[in-house]
Image (cartoon, rainbow, N blue to C red):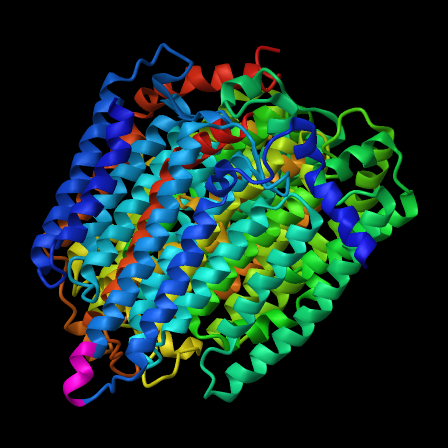
Amino acid sequence: MNNLSTFLFSKLTLGQEAAAAPLVSWGDFQAILPALIFIATGTLLLMLDCFNRGLSRTGESKREHSSLSAAINFIGLLGTVAAGAVVCASMEQSQATVFAFGDSIRVDSYSSSVTLIIILGTFFSLLSAMDYLRRFDAEHGEFHCLVHYAAASMILFVQSNNLIMLFLTVETLSMAVYLLTSYLRDSRRGVEGGLKYFILGSFSSGFLLFGFTLLFGATGEINLSAIAGSISSGEADQSLLLAGMALGIIGLGFKVGAFPFHSWLPDAYEAAPTVATGFMSVTVKSAAIFVLLRFLMLASDQEGAAGAATAAEIFTPVLSLLAIATMLFGNLVALMQDSVKRMLAYSAIGHTGYLLVGIVAALGPGGKAAAAAVIFYLLPYTLMSLAVFTLLGYMGRDGQDRENFGDYRGLSTQRPFLSLCLLIVLVSFAGIPPTAGFWAKLYIFRAAVDGGHTWLVLTGILTSIISLYFYLRLVVNVYMRPAEEEIDADPDSNLASGLVIATAALALVILGIFPDLNLEALLDTLGR
Amino acid sequence: MTITLTLLVPVLTAILLLCIPKDKTPQLRMTALFGSLATLAFSLALLGRFDSANAGFQFIEEYKWVPSLEINYHVGLDGISLFLVVLSALLTPIAILCSWKSVEKRVREFHIALLLLTSGVIGVFVALDLMLFYVFWEVMLIPMYLLIGVWGSTERIRAAVKFFIYTMAGSLLMFLAILYLYKYTGTFSVEEIYKNQLTGTAGMLCFLAFALSFAIKVPLFPVHTWLPDAHTEAPTAGSVILAGVLLKLGIYGFIRFAIPFFPEAASAAAPWISILAIVGIIFGALMCFVQEDMKRLIAYSSVSHMGFVVLGLFTYTSGSLQGVEGSVLHMVNHGISTGALFLLIGSIYERRHTRRLSDYGGLAPVAPRLAIIFFITTLSSIGLPFLNGFVGEFLILQGAYSQNIFYAAFAGLGIILGAVYMLSLYRRLFFGETDRRENAELKDLDGRELAFLLPLVALMVLLGLFSPWFTAKIQPSIEHWLKLVGTGGG
């Protein structure tokens, strides 16, 4: 044990010694500033909440309580905006790849793009949580704190450049998300879902850790770039390497919710308070998809290496199979759901499948376009998912979400604009123009067709047809069936949620008509 | 700019409608009507400035749209799409007028859907970039789906979902083919792909994907089953647009995309498609005999008519100019006469609230204006000389005869059957005893209804009498097209 840590330490500091630089410099902290802001705000909010605890929600101190809650919300949002501004500023300043903390952090244009998406998702989640938690009478500061900690660890997760960092951050983020899942601790469902997620999640962490160990054993490196170098030079032990990669894929496949490792996902999504579901479905998935992409590109990103080609070749069929199974499973099972929330959970699995198609394409030649396509997909997906889960929360009342399809009957007569937004979001989910969802699918499928993965695209298209049915089912209820009762979701208490939904819908249409607003910028950042 | 304006005016009107409070019904209707009339005016401007001598695309506009994916906003018109654009623009104000009284719930959303639909279909007819075309092709689905599903009759939801899933299934396969085509040619520009026609197995597979998508839209037997449902359940305005314009999109797709992109595969598949078209002609006609529901009957007659159009189009393999010309003309003719039939039936339905034929009889003495206009429309639909239907059918028969005498024989049989079922529909509606009190009290057409019916009747006569003026605009483009697909001039 001792030997190992000495060894690791020497590995960590090796690069620094060569450059004779100080072990940690100010620039290192600058690289992780967004994450630091989240951690600081989260801690601050937790402390602020202590003052809120003592105040009763009725009588004289009610006002004080609500003003303190407002302050907590405000500070939380402010921290998110600050983090976003920092990322934007640093992207503006330089596109160069920055390594920090002795190569264990890598900030480049890819990870910055994903960081921005995570921050956007966090911001929208916090905004919609303002209404939701108040109405559900669950306004505790630890929600904000957990969201901030999760966001911080996700940012570090996408920035990590060595196996230890990867594992530590994935654990921290999982812990935060497990807690968020069972945030409504008085509900049985919440506790059950959280526990299920926790137990299965620990399993997957075990796989991940074992996989990382084998990778380390095969290459003698913990640094991702060094591992890639060792793979491409052919020095690494092939069988250990493949086993390590396979276990890593399983571990990360669990986090993204790919088919055989998905079983936690519907339960966790259903159990979590709807705002937390939105948050998880967007940020955790974005982060994990990106890390999976980067992890797999280890084996393919190297030019002209014979050994590397075999690793990519071996994993391409496996991942293709995984993608096909995920697309089919997610969309087929979503077809049979009676609860909107579960339907969305399975459709999220389906979307993981489409993302996996992009990842498979990224393994082949011309992988850069496919990698860009995967990242491009994340933004519309974030907007759609957040909008729809926010809407689910918006409709909730009496501490209950409105989860059945029938609850949405006749929504369009009572809330025409909300329904229009929902229509746009669902159309975008189904990948129909003129919405951003269409371009996301187009870009991924185009990259896959270019890479010769016609079967994957064909499955993607067939499952898209299947998915039409369950997205339309909601549209049918909203637009075509008469209302049975007055929908008494109060728009005044849902101002922030309404804002989130409207902004997301508008953004989806604008991006749908001018996809280059994002695409062009993304390609500029990533390099064509 | 005119094309862009034609496309934009309906969208802008729709956005304007969104700003008007939803209970101000008259203002909403007037705004929508003006918007659609403006669209019509722009399309007529296109017609007026169209240069008949020019066989290529006119009024071309090309801007970069999504440079990172090499997709351009590229639009233009030729003789083939010209009249289809005008027809689409013409039918929208008519659809708005005919819904003036019958659509009372969610008036604002209704008109928004109708206007967006107009934009979508016109966009399909003018798009010269494959991805732009696909975007328009899909954009129009949602409004049509909502028109059927929200404002339709009792079985509307099933019909709407069926319509949507059928069409999407076809178009998503086409989407794959488009991506493959892009991989092969490196461009989405239609004219570039013309120069780079895809052959071999890949060409065949791509052709099949395109053809399936278009065949569903036409609809060709045996993928026609969504049509009777959609037609029957849609509100009158929806049926008019569906019959008048949407069915033409499939044929247009064959002409503009599927055949010239993959001429080799298309001519290999031509006999099979022709046979399906003939089956459609006869099957559609026979189905008409057993329909009790007036709208369903017209829907099946559309299946039969569209069979004619497809048959005419695929005579191009023998280099027949007449066949193709006939099929382009017949598209327009069918749009006018079937559109008018749906309007008339809509008017009758508004008065009696039943579509069952057995509920009617003896309407002629009660409602003479209705009877006369219905009669002219019936005659136009069965192809009486001097009315529009004749010209197209005659040219198609001529083309079919030059290709294969059996095709012509079956098509001729279809025309005879068509005359029988249409005249018997007329007889059951208008002749006989006026034995029901509701029928005896039926009101004749009023001024509003005449306002949208008479222009169509006038067009039936004009197209019948002055068809050379129309063919002169179409012909150069078709000759050019025949060269493109490799059967012209030889």
Total marks drawn? 0
Q: Which residue is drawn at 28% across and 34% down?
A: B7
**Which quarter of the figure has residue A410?**
bottom left
Asked if residue A84 lies left or right of residue B407, the reply is left
The residue sitting at 53% across, 31% down in the picture is A526
- Closer to us: B229 or A389: A389
Q: Give the answer, above or below, for where B469 lies relative to A256.
A: above
* Among the 4 quarters of the image, the one containing residue A140: bottom left
Q: Residue at x 29, y 71 (%)?
A: A131
Q: Position of residue A424 (x, y in %)?
A: 37, 54
| Rendered-image quadrant of the C terminus of chain B | top right
Residue B299 on image: x %, y %: 43, 56
The answer to whether residue B270 is visible is no
The answer to whether residue A61 is magenta is yes
Judging depth in this view, the residue of B388 and A40 nearest the camera is A40
Horizontal side of B352 relative to B313 (left or right) equals: left
In the rendering, at what x and y percent does residue B146 appear?
35, 59
Of the pair B489 and A275, the residue shown nearer to us: A275
> From the image, which quarter does the N terminus of chain B lie in?
top left
Q: Does the magenta stretch include residue A37?
A: no
In the image, residue A200 lies at what x, y percent?
68, 72
Query: Quick check: can you spot residue A321?
Result: yes
Say whether residue A264 is left or right of residue A243: left
The residue located at (49%, 45%) in the rendering is A32
Mainly helix, strand or loop, the magenta region?
helix
Question: On screen, B259 above or below B283?
Answer: above
The magenta region covers: A59-64
Q: Is residue A146 above or below residue A219?
A: below
